[in-house]
Every structure is written in structure tokens, then in C-alpha cells.
Image: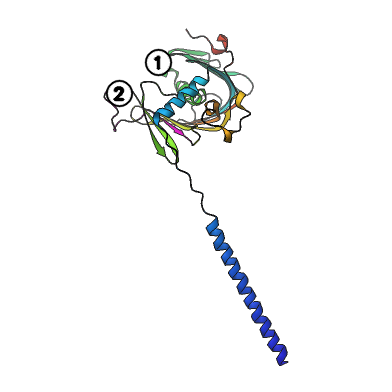
Amino acid sequence: MWCWRRKREASGRQGSMLAHFIGVCIAIFILAGCTLITPKEETPLRQVTAQELTALLRHREAAIQSLKGLFSAKVRGGLIPIASRIEGTVYYRRPNALRLRGFTALGSELFDFAQADDLYRLRLPLEGKTYTGHQSEMKGAGKLARFSQLSVWAVGGVLGTNAIAGDEMVKVVEDRGRYRLDVYAPATGGMSPSRSPIHRLWFDRRLLVVQEEWLGSSGEVEATIQYDDFRPLEELKSIPAQAMGDQDVRLFRPFKISLEDGRGQGSVQVIFHEMHHNHAIRAEDLGQIS
């Protein structure tokens, strides 16, 4: 009896010691894991000048002499008094000829917007109305004028027409792990710190424009645009995105665009199904404005 009790106590102590040893091992393993699994630190942004970003935008603009594509759009918030889901086409030819056409899912034409230089034509087949004139006179078209302006801004990120004009002033700052290029209207007396920018562009580490803001004369936000789903245009499809260098990003374009109207009138989301650049564009594709 006594021997059996001694053996049971010894066995109990051994079991307790084994459990304690296993617990210590688990604790050490957890602590070691905590030291090994550390948050990945973002590497600092490399130095990029405003002049380099400006030159990159101009190179991207020059890379597209013409473009045609198919897209789908969702419009929310009453920006246009027509269908909220649109199928559309875009035609563009440098330097300034652009045409956007929108259709219902059944193929009925909703609008036909064309512009060249400062002239525009907006045709609304369902309403039997056509507006023509200069861009500055477009207010008579009401919400559709606003929708047309927002559409031009949105596709500008695809066409490269958001490049910086030669007389505009720019500066670059780091903003939450991205480059932000602030664009100022031309000024004769230099750039005052109190002046508000008229345009902002955010570049990611690949130097792709992922966000854009258009600003009013008093600094109010007219529109905020997000660019996503970057893909190469046709002849660069064989190059994986992670392998592209600075010399290749000129032809990478966003296939998804999300725009928020700064005046609170609504939002537009555009998804491109295909884009073809530097192909022949017929005059009738662009529409003639006179």
C-alpha cells in the first residue's frame, strides 16, 4: 500500500512537472513568434521632383495619339435626368477632339457629347434637344452640363489629358505614403503660400496616378476621382504589372474610375471593357462640330 502511494505521488509530480515544462515551451514559442512576426515597415518614398512628375504626365499624354473604347457607367444621386446605368463609347484624337456617347442596355441613345477646342455639342435624342456653343456657355444645359464636365475630367485620367500646362506652377509633397502634386494657376508675381491649388494628383510608388481632385477658384473641391484596376494597353499585355519599370508605365491606364461630385450632386463609376489606342479614328466617329 505504502509503495503504491509513493509511486502514485511520484507519478503525479512527474505529470505536473511535464505539464509545467510544456507550458513553458508554449510560452517561449509564443514570445519568439511575437518577436519574429513584426509589422512590415514601409520603405521611405524615393526622392521625386515636381518637374519629374510633370514630365511623366506629359510623356503619358504623348503616348496616346488616339483612343477608342467601350465602357459601362453607373450614375447615382440625380446627376442626370436619364437612366442611371449607361453603356457607352469614347473616341479621342489628339490634341483636343473627344466624343462620348451613352446608351441604355437596350441600345437606345441617351446622349451624344462632342467637343473640340472650346466648342461643344450635346445632343439628347430622347428629349429632342441639342445644345451647341462654347464650353463657357454650357450652363444652359443644366445638370447635363455638369455631367458632361465631370465625364471629361474622369476620362482625362485615361487619355492623359490631365497633364500640366506649360504655364501652370507645381510642387510635390509626401502625403500618407504617396506623392501629391499640387497644381497652381499661372501667376505673374510667383507662387504665394496663401494661394490655393486648382488641381491635385496623387501618385503611388509606381508613379501611377491613383487619385485626383479638381478644385474651384476658392479651393473648394469640384470633383474627387479614384483610379483603379491598372492594365497595360494592348501591346504591353505580356508584361506583368509587378515587373514594369518607369519606362513602361506610360501605357498603363486605369480600367475603373470612381468620381464623386464635390457639389454633392452624385457620383459616377466607369468601368472600361476594352481600350484601343493609336488606331485610325474616322471623322464621323468623332462627330463634326461647327
Which residue occupies 54% across, 63% down? 31
For the residue pair 185 and 30, the one nearer the viewer reads as 30
* Residue 89 in magenta stretch: no
Using the image, determine if residue 65 lies above or below residue 210.
above
Q: Amino acid at mark 2?
A: Ala
> Which residue bears the numbered disc 1?
137
Q: Residues under labels 2 and 1: Cα distance?
A: 25 Å
Instruction: Name the one closer to the observer, 69 or 206.
Output: 206
Which circle's residue, 2 or 1, is located before the other in the chain? 1
Instruction: State yes or no: discs 2 and 1 in contact (Cβ < 8 Å).
Output: no
- Residue in front for this viewpoint, 289 or 68: 68
Q: Residue furthest top?
A: 290
Magenta region: 186-204
Dot 1 falls on a residue whose secondary structure is helix
Q: Is residue 5 visible?
A: yes
Q: Say if 174 sits above or below 11 in the image.
A: above
The residue under label 2 is 187
